[in-house]
Amino acid sequence: MRRLVAAAVVFSLALPVWPQELAPPPPPPDDEDQPRPRQEPLPHQAGYYESCFGVPRVESPPFGISGEIVIPIDGSGVGIPSVPVASKSTDEKAWLLAAVLAAVALPVVVYAVDSPAPQLVLQRFRCPTFTLDLLGGADNGAPLGNGAFGFVSTRFSFGVGHIATDFQYDGAPRAVSAFSAHLLIRPTPREHIEGGLAIGYRRSVLVDRVQDGLEVGFPHRYALWRDGLRTVAFELRPLLLIGSSIEPSLEAAFLIPLAPVLQLRVGGRAYTFGGDLLCGLSTGLSLTL
C-alpha cells in the first residue's frame, strides 16, 4: 500500500504544468497584404454654379414670408388718407390708378392659392442674383405735344433671399427722364408667381418741370411656363409716386428666354406726369446671373 501511494506522488510531480495563457499567434509573412482601414467618403460640397443653376437638392423646406395686403375700396373703416390730386385728365388718371391697384391686389390672391415653387427655383432664390435690363422705346402723351419721343432705360437689380434692391435710369432728351431706387422685401416664390414689396424714391424731369417723392408698389411676375430656370413670364410693375400728388405708373412686359441667363423683353408702360397720362412701348434684353 505504501509503495502504491509513493508511486502516485512521484507521477503527479512529474507532470508538466499547463500554461495559464494562450501564446500569441505567429506574425503573418512579410509578403502578405495588410488590411487597410476603411476610409469614409467625404461629403460632396456643391459649388456656386451647381447650387444656383444646377440639379435641385433635397433638403428641409426654406423659411418663408407670407402675409396679406388689405386695400380699402370704399370710404368705410380706417385706411390711407386721401390726398387731393390736381389733374388735367382726371378720367384717364382714375382708370390708370384703378389698374395699378388691381395689379397690386391680384398677386396677393394668386400667391395665397398657388403651389410651392420647384426646388431649383427655391435654390436660385437663396443665391445672390444680379439682373441687368436694357430697354429702348418711345412715349407719347399730352405733356409731349404731338408725336412720340424715344427713351432708353437701364435697370440694375440685386437680391439674395428675401431682400433685394433695384436702380433704374430713364434717359430721354425730349421726353420724361427719371431716376429711381427701391428696396424690395420678397416673399418666398411660388410655382406661378414671384415678386416683392418695393419702397423707394423716384425723381422725374420734363424740361423745367420736376416731380419726386416716395414710391411704393408691388413689382411681380407670373411664370407661364418653366423648364428648369428657363421661364416664359409676364411681368407687371405697378407703382405709386406719393409727393405733392399721387402719380400712378404701370409697366408690363413679356419675358421670353433666349438662353439660360438671357431673356427678351417686349412690353409697354403707362404713367402720369403732373396728372397727364403718357403711354409708350419698349423692347430690350434682360441678363440674369
Image: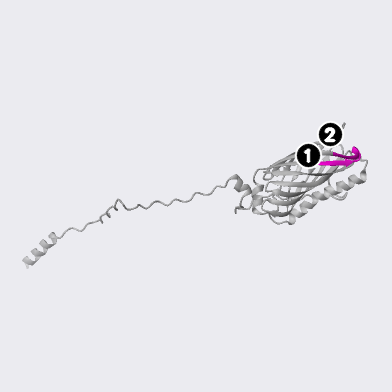
Is residue 125 part of the magenta span, yes or no? no
In the figure, residue 149 lies in which quadrant?
top right
The residue beneath circle 1 is: 153
- Residue positioned 66% across, 54% down in the render: 118
With 22 as the anchor, is 174 left or right in this view? right
Q: Which residues are magenta?
A: 136-149
Q: What is the x, y in percent for residue 248?
A: 84, 43
Expressed as whole percent of the image width and height from the top left, the position of residue 123 reads 64, 49
Name the residue: 78% across, 39% down.
153
137 magenta-colored: yes
Residue contact at pointers 1 and 2, CB within 8 angstroms: no
Mark sitting earlier along the chain (1/2):
1
Q: Please name whichever residue, 44 or 197, is drawn nearer the observer in this view of the structure.
A: 44
Residue that numbered label 2 is attached to: 173
222 vs 27, left or right, is: right
- Residue 234, relative to residue 151: is it above or below? below
What x and y, as percent, mark residue 229? 67, 51
Expressed as whole percent of the image width and height from the top left, the position of residue 94 reads: 89, 46
Mark 1 surroundings: few (<14), some (14-19) or many (≥20) residues within 10 A: some
**Amino acid carrying mark 1 in the image:** Ser
- Colour theme: one colour
The three-letter amino acid code for the residue at tag 2 is: Pro
Whether residue 94 is visible to the viewer of this picture, yes or no, is yes
30 on left or right of 226: left
Pick out the residue farthest to the front. 258
Q: CA distance from mark 1 to mark 2?
A: 12 Å
- Quarter of the image with the C terminus is top right
Give the dominant element type of the magenta stretch: helix, strand or loop.
strand
Question: Residue visible at 77% across and 41% down?
Answer: 135
Q: What SS does tag 1 mark?
A: strand
On the question of residue 80 being in view, the answer is: no
